[in-house]
Amino acid sequence: MAIPIRAVTIRELPEKINLRQGRLFFRQLQKSMDGDRPRIVLDCSKLAGCDKRTLLLLLRCLEEAMKRNGDLKLAGLSPAAKTLLELTGAKRLFEIFDTPAEAVDSFHLLAGGTVSPVSPVFLCEDSQPGSENAA
């Protein structure tokens, strides 16, 4: 019996998140969660800083995924961002990985800790509509 592997969506956070960019990013993320049990990786490697607004956006994104019985993982966080998550207690809510590839692989772990040989990924390189590319 073959076990189907669902796609993982990678979304790249912009360098800076102001109110407008945060709302746009969140709306686009909601649109990419059209099915049940979304699996999302937020690539934070380009994020210049992590402040209250960024933290609230990350929490809203996690909440949205959880409403649909899905999961959201973070990748590429700066040391300062990791510290902020730790100080606020939010670090306990997220699985955090060094790279997006490690986060994607964590969704595909099989019993015994081996990674499934097929890892379909939809990569969204920026937050512009229509920017989804199959990888």
Image (cartoon, helix red, strand yellow):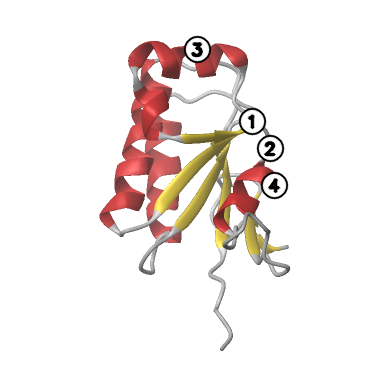
Query: Based on the displayed image, in which of its 4 quarters is residue 99 positioned?
Result: top right
Task: Left or right? Give the position of 96 relative to 51.
Answer: right
Residue 101, disc: 4
Q: Choose the circle earlier in sequence order: 4 or 3.
A: 3
Q: Which mark is residue 83?
A: 3
For image coordinates 66% across by 32% down, the residue present is 98
Q: What element carries label 2?
A: loop
How far apart marks 1 and 3 lie (CA) works out to 13 Å
User: Tag on residue 99?
Assistant: 2
How far is disc 4 from disc 3 in space, using C-alphas? 22 Å
Lower position in the chain sequence, tag 2 or tag 1: 1
- Residue 61: name its quadrant: top left
Q: How far apart are marks 2 and 4 (CA)?
A: 5 Å
Can residue 108 be spotted in the picture? yes
Spatial separation of the CA atoms under disc 3 and disc 2: 17 Å
Q: What is the three-letter code of the residue carrying label 3?
A: Thr
**Mark 4 and mark 1: span between their CA atoms?**
10 Å
| SS category of the residue bearing label 4 | helix
Q: In this view, does 49 lie above or below 13?
A: above
Q: Looking at the figure, which quarter contains the C terminus?
A: bottom right
Q: Nearer the viewer, residue 115 or 135?
A: 115
Residue located farthest toward the bottom when viewing the structure as drawn: 1
Mark 4 belongs to which amino acid?
Answer: Ala
* Circles 2 and 4 in contact, beta carbons < 8 Å: yes
Look at the image and tell me whether residue 19 can be seen: no
Q: Are marks 2 and 1 in contact (CB under 8 Å)?
A: yes
Element at label 1: loop
Q: Nearer the viewer, residue 127 or 105?
A: 105
Amino acid carrying label 2: it is Thr
Report x, y in % for residue 87. Answer: 39, 10
Q: What residue is shown with label 1? A: 76
Identify which amino acid the numbered label 1 is placed on.
Answer: Gly
